[in-house]
């Protein structure tokens, strides 16, 4: 999954919270944090070994944009 964070969500422990909520480990494969027009912006590619639908809903409920990636 590719997760995109904007503004305050960029600095919140969302990955840890969702991993605990779903009782499933989340592996960070790649990430970056920067600014676009003075707005914090972060992007992570994660590996998730659980229910992708539940994970998507949990991330989106916290204001994170989710894209499912295929190999």
Image (cartoon, rainbow, N blue to C red):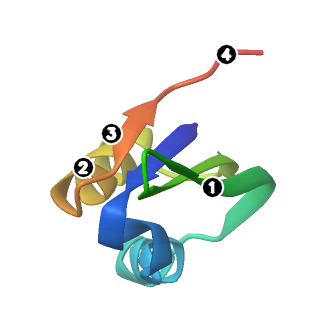
Q: Label 1's element?
A: strand
Q: Residues within 10 Å of mark 4 (few under 14, many from 20)?
A: few
Residue 25, horizontal then vertical, whole percent: 64, 71
Residue 61 quadrant: bottom left
Task: Determine whether label 3 and label 4 are within 8 Å by CB.
Answer: no
Residue 39, horizontal then vertical, whole percent: 39, 56
Per the model, the C-alpha gap separating discs 4 and 1 is 25 Å
Sequence order check, earlier mark of 2 and 3: 3
Task: Determine whether label 2 and label 3 are within 8 Å by CB.
Answer: no
- Judge by depth and name the residue closer to the eye, 65 or 47: 65
Q: Which residue is mark 1?
A: 34
Q: Label 3's element?
A: helix
Which corner quadrant holds the C terminus?
top right
Q: Nearer the viewer, mark 3 or mark 1?
A: 1
Q: Which mark is residue 60?
A: 2
Q: Nearer the viewer, mark 2 or mark 1?
A: 1
Per the model, the C-alpha gap separating discs 3 and 1 is 28 Å
In the displayed structure, 1 sits above or below 42; it is: above
Per the model, the C-alpha gap separating discs 2 and 3 is 11 Å
Which corner quadrant holds the N terminus?
top right
Residue 2, horizontal then vertical, whole percent: 57, 37
- Horizontal side of residue 6 vs 45, given as left or right: left
Q: Nearer the viewer, mark 4 or mark 1?
A: 1
């Amino acid at each position: 999954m590719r997760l995109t964070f904007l503004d305050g969500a960029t600095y919140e422990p969302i990955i840890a919270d969702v991993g605990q909520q779903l009782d499933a480990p989340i592996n960070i494969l790649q990430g970056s944090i920067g600014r676009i027009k003075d707005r914090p912006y972060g992007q992570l590619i994660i590996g998730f070994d659980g229910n992708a639908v539940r994970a998507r809903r949990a991330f989106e409920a916290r204001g994170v944009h989710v894209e499912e990636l295929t190999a």
